[in-house]
Image: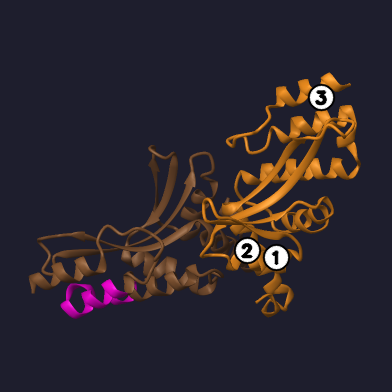
Chain colours: A orange, B brown
Amino acid sequence: MIESYNTPTLKRELGNYISGYVDGEGCFSVSFSIRPKLKIGWEVKPSFAVAQNFDRREVLDLMIEYFGCGHIRKNTADKTLKYEIRSLDELLEKVIPHFHSFPLLSSKQKDFLLFKEVCKRMKELKHLEAQGFQEIVEIAHKMNTSGKRKYSQTMLLASFQMKI
Amino acid sequence: MIESYNTPTLKRELGNYISGYVDGEGCFSVSFSIRPKLKIGWEVKPSFAVAQNFDRREVLDLMIEYFGCGHIRKNTADKTLKYEIRSLDELLEKVIPHFHSFPLLSSKQKDFLLFKEVCKRMKELKHLEAQGFQEIVEIAHKMNTSGKRKYSQTMLLASFQMKI
């Protein structure tokens, strides 16, 4: 499908279309998992994901081609598919530059900018140090404020303080 | 906001973004209401709608500006906003030409083409005649096949046949 977008103009058109789609259906998130073996006790997991119903996977396939990375997983419970990119390098090299060139037009842009900040700090390994981890927790909790979180900011910072 | 899209290139970029957004969040539908006073007994109601949560109405406001028509309604029950265009003339003159210029890339494109066919036939007043109404019912039931319908195709055609 993507071979037909073979001119710079058509590529820009597809880029804008994808940003529009993601502005509706996509999500930038930073989650945390307990990892006792890590010095800081927590793993920081950034993710870019787009969900869709089983019967409409074409755009997710298109995104795999467009970004050249990521996977589609089935959630049989709610009959949805989820296209997801979790690799920090792929997020930094492929996803973030795309949304720089083709910005989101809704308030989700704010989440994207915070997400970018977390990824940038992770590349500098800030998430492995006390101060850096604290700041990342604070940035992450400014994102997707209407969604639910497994661990509150207070819980993360308290449990982390217990370890140092 | 839209004044900043003041060159043909930027307008095309916005057009592609909007088609991407609609491919995720939009819906083309044709519904039917009982209208005993109409000769055919039924009103045919085409609609283009995009839903969004209360806290993310920017793109719906942008669409009002872009299409130059339509309204946003609040659904306090599920905390969503719905941008909707129901006027046949506005659908024919503003919505349908947009999606000709900036096609959807998912299977929703099939729904759009069926929707366009219904609107075109309504402009020719086919929905007010027996044969034309039957054909519109058949086309409408090929759309959004995963969604729920208030009246089945069988029920619509049977009740309509009772009247002629």
Instruction: Return the mark for residue A64.
Output: 1
- Left or right of B125? Residue B8 is right
Of circles 1 and 3, the one toward us is 3
Q: Badge 3 sits on which subunit? A: A
Q: Badge 1 sits on which subunit? A: A
Q: Amino acid at mark 1?
A: Ile
Q: Dots 1 and 2: beta carbons under 8 Å?
A: yes
Badge 1 crowding class, 10 Å Cα cut-off, few under 14, some 14 to 19, many 20 or more, is: some
Label 1 to label 3, Cα distance in Å?
Answer: 36 Å
- Left or right of A57? Residue A84 is right
Span of residues in magenta: B119-138
Label 3 to label 2, Cα distance in Å?
Answer: 37 Å
Q: Amino acid at mark 3?
A: Phe
Q: Quadrant of residue B113?
A: bottom left
Q: Badge 2 sits on which subunit? A: A
Residue at position x 10%, y 60% in the image = B36
Q: Which residue is mark 3?
A: A160
> What secondary structure is marked by label 3?
helix
Whole-percent x and y of residue B54?
A: 48, 40
Q: Earlier in the sequence, mark 3 or mark 2?
A: 2
Residue at position x 17%, y 76% in the image = B129
Could you say which is closer to the camera, residue B101 or residue A62? A62
Whole-percent x and y of residue B34?
A: 17, 59
